[in-house]
Image (cartoon, coloured by chain):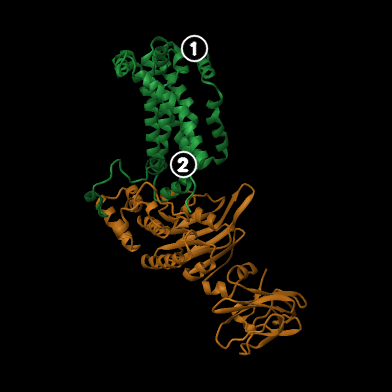
């Protein structure tokens, strides 16, 4: 049985439908990310799980108990906020001990648990510090320890890394994943950063307009995006329009006929279909990667250090491709003709 | 390159300071001249020797303290609730809190006397207790704009909504959240509001005089009419008290959590993580 079930949950604020018929089953110990642009409803779903918002419709079931109407303080769910939300009047020790004191645990047990939590986040030496005396990264680690101290059933992380600088963000996300694995705690992580979601999740829920567009493991989300939105939001994609020649999978891009690996079932002959190709799937050098070649014209070349990004005009579409930089690499200059090579199996057929 | 000395600004500051300080100094000097031909604190001694002074200042201090407590008990939960649940009502509440600045105390007190006078359904002015209560409530109203602003600013600095949610996710009830998280974080704001209330109500004249209460304000005015040197001494002392209130307000407003009135000894600061 699923540990946490979000069943047909909807939420409206007046006439504004923020979450529409959201369904998700989460297993015990799973690390799930809600990924999507701001305003897609991901934080609202998280807040409904936390008990800060009441669903307009649907049910939330945790460990067999319907918690839809349960106040947040009775849910035993830990939460980490984007703005840390440490209590400014308490030092690190008291912040982490707060949930344990509320639960009425004996002093000795509280001290032992707090010390265990501080060891977990490697901040034992800062127990006496106040929030204003610590860096953002340290504060967020304390917030994590505080949320974990009362042994919650589920840990919710609401964009916990957004306020931190890039380097701390990467190290802290690895730490969060490490701690989550160590404790085996069921976790929901909300983010708008696709790299974050791809790198630490067991599964990702890509949200758009209040709905889950796709739910899957990171590799599937990246390699086999189900919708045009998922394809464009996760990673960089080149969109190419093609005309269906027959439903077995033969299409025409410009004047070139390409055979797709899968049949096209949702389009009739003569209709247009959207194909997508990742920047890393194409090549402009003569290394003959793949079986398909499309003639094009170079629009511009950008040197990005380890990678060179070339913008091309292919059959009237502007596409961009990355080539690893090497001492021998020579790429065509702007205005020159170029041939884009790729494997037809790398083309993704997008459903709208 | 060194900046040139700002002569113009310094001159303006000096003239403005002189406008306040010279009369204050003149009053102070006059207060020392009670005994002819010598400087003495005789006027101050005379003030402190007066039973009426002790009685009226005690009365005003108690009335002010009660006003502070009632004011805080009304303002703090109101602002917390409005900021948390009814943010759209904030401009309305803010406007209401500013009304005492627009309505003169004399209008307020005549309104009270009409509403709670001998012929009303609630004749508060018919008993001492009732009139004392009216005076205290009048002080609460007069200090409302200052108390409101002070506490509202205090709550704006901390993100009460998120702190409340954080406390609730850790199992705390609303009451516990307010008592252990919200209140301690706005304590310095409440204290500054309290000092403002104190300095306003201590020397307040109109309400106390028209409600015929034995308060410090009417005593000050009476002394001004009857005596020469004592009022000057009283004025200087009142100034001193107000400034002390301001200094305390500044101190509490700038205090960081965890800091003590006196710095901790090194021994006790080496506290480990065990409680």
| Depicted A204 relative to depicted B186: above or below | below
Residue at the spot x=48%, y=27% of the render?
B19
In the rendered structure, the colour chosen for chain A is orange
The residue indicated by pointer 1 is B117
Residue at the spot x=46%, y=41% of the render?
B155
In the picture, measured across the screen, residue B225 lies left or right of residue B101, that is left
The quadrant of the rendering that contains the C terminus of chain A is bottom right
In the rendered structure, the colour chosen for chain B is green
Q: How far apart, in angstroms, are the residues tagged by discs 1 and 2?
A: 38 Å
Name the chain letter of the residue that bears numbered label 1.
B
| 1 or 2: mark nearer the eye | 2
User: Residue B171, percent across and down?
Assistant: 39, 49
| Depicted A331 relative to depicted A220: above or below | below
| Depicted B52 relative to depicted B66: above or below | above
Q: Nearer the viewer, residue A289 or B191?
A: B191
On the image, which quarter does residue A309 sit in? bottom right
In the picture, measured across the screen, residue A117 lies left or right of residue A232, that is left
The quadrant of the rendering that contains the N terminus of chain A is bottom left
Residue at the spot x=78%, y=77% of the render?
A270
Give me the disc on residue B155: 2
User: Residue B210, percent across and down?
Assistant: 47, 13
User: Residue A132, percent across and down?
Assistant: 39, 51
Q: Earlier in the sequence, mark 1 or mark 2?
A: 1
Q: Residues within 10 Å of mark 2 (few under 14, many from 20)?
A: many
Q: Secondary structure at mark 1?
A: loop
Name the chain letter of the residue that bears numbered label 2.
B
Q: Nearer the viewer, residue B56 or A316?
A: B56
The answer to whether residue A63 shows anywhere in this view is: no
């Amino acid at each position: 049985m699923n540990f946490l079930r979000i069943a047909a949950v909807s939420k409206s604020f007046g006439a504004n439908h923020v979450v529409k018929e959201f369904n998700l089953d989460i297993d015990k110990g799973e690390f799930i990310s809600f990924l999507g642009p701001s305003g897609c409803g991901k934080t609202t779903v998280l807040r409904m799980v936390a008990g800060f918002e009441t669903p307009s419709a649907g049910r939330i079931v945790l460990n067999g108990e319907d918690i839809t109407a349960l106040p947040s303080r009775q849910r035993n769910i830990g939460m980490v906020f984007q703005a840390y939300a440490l209590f400014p009047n308490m030092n690190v020790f008291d912040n982490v001990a707060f949930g344990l004191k509320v639960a009425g645990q004996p002093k000795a047990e509280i001290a032992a648990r707090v010390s265990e939590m501080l060891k977990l986040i490697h901040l034992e030496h800062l127990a006496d510090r106040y929030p204003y005396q610590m860096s953002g990264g340290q504060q967020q680690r304390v917030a994590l320890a505080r949320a974990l101290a009362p042994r919650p059933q589920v840990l919710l992380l609401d964009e916990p890394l957004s306020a931190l600088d890039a380097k701390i963000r990467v190290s802290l996300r690895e730490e969060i994943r490490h701690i989550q694995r160590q404790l085996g705690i069921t976790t929901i992580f909300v983010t708008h950063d696709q790299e974050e979601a791809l790198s630490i999740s067991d599964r990702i829920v890509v949200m758009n307009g209040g709905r889950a567009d796709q739910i899957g493991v990171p590799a599937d989300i990246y390699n086999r995006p189900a919708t045009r939105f998922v394809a464009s939001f996760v990673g960089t994609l080149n969109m190419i329009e093609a005309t269906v020649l027959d439903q077995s999978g033969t299409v025409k891009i410009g004047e070139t006929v390409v055979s797709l690996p899968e049949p096209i079932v949702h389009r009739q002959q003569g209709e247009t279909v959207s194909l997508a190709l990742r920047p890393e799937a194409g090549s402009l050098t003569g290394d003959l990667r793949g079986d398909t070649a499309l003639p094009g014209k170079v629009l511009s070349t950008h040197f990005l250090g380890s990678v060179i990004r070339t913008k091309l005009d292919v059959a009237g579409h502007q596409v961009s491709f990355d080539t690893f930089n090497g001492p021998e690499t020579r790429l065509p200059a702007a205005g020159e003709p170029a041939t884009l090579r790729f494997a037809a199996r790398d083309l993704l057929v997008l459903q709208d | 390159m060194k900046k040139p000395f700002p002569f113009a600004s310094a001159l303006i500051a000096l003239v403005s300071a002189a406008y306040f300080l010279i009369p204050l100094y003149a009053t102070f000097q006059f207060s020392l001249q009670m005994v002819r031909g010598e400087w003495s604190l005789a006027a101050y001694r005379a003030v402190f020797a007066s039973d009426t002074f002790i009685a009226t200042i005690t009365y005003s201090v108690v009335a002010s303290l009660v006003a502070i407590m009632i004011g805080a008990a009304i303002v703090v939960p109101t602002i917390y609730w409005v900021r948390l649940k009814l943010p759209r009502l904030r401009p309305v509440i803010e406007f209401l809190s500013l009304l005492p600045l627009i309505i003169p105390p004399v209008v307020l007190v005549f309104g009270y006397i009409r509403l709670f006078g001998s012929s009303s359904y609630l004749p508060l002015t018919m008993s001492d207790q009732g009139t004392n209560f009216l005076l205290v409530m009048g002080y609460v109203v007069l200090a409302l704009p200052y108390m409101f602003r002070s506490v509202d600013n205090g709550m704006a600095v901390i993100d009460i909504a998120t702190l409340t949610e954080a406390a609730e996710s850790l199992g705390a009830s609303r009451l516990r959240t307010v008592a252990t998280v919200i209140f301690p974080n706005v304590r310095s704001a409440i204290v500054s509001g309290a000092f403002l209330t104190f300095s306003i109500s201590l020397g307040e004249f109109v309400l106390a005089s028209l409600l015929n209460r034995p308060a410090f304000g009417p005593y000050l005015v009476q002394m001004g009419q009857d005596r020469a040197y004592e009022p000057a001494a009283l004025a200087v002392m009142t100034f001193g008290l107000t400034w002390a209130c301001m200094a305390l307000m500044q101190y509490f407003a700038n205090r960081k959590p965890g800091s003590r009135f006196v710095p901790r000894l090194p021994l006790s600061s080496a506290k480990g993580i065990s409680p």
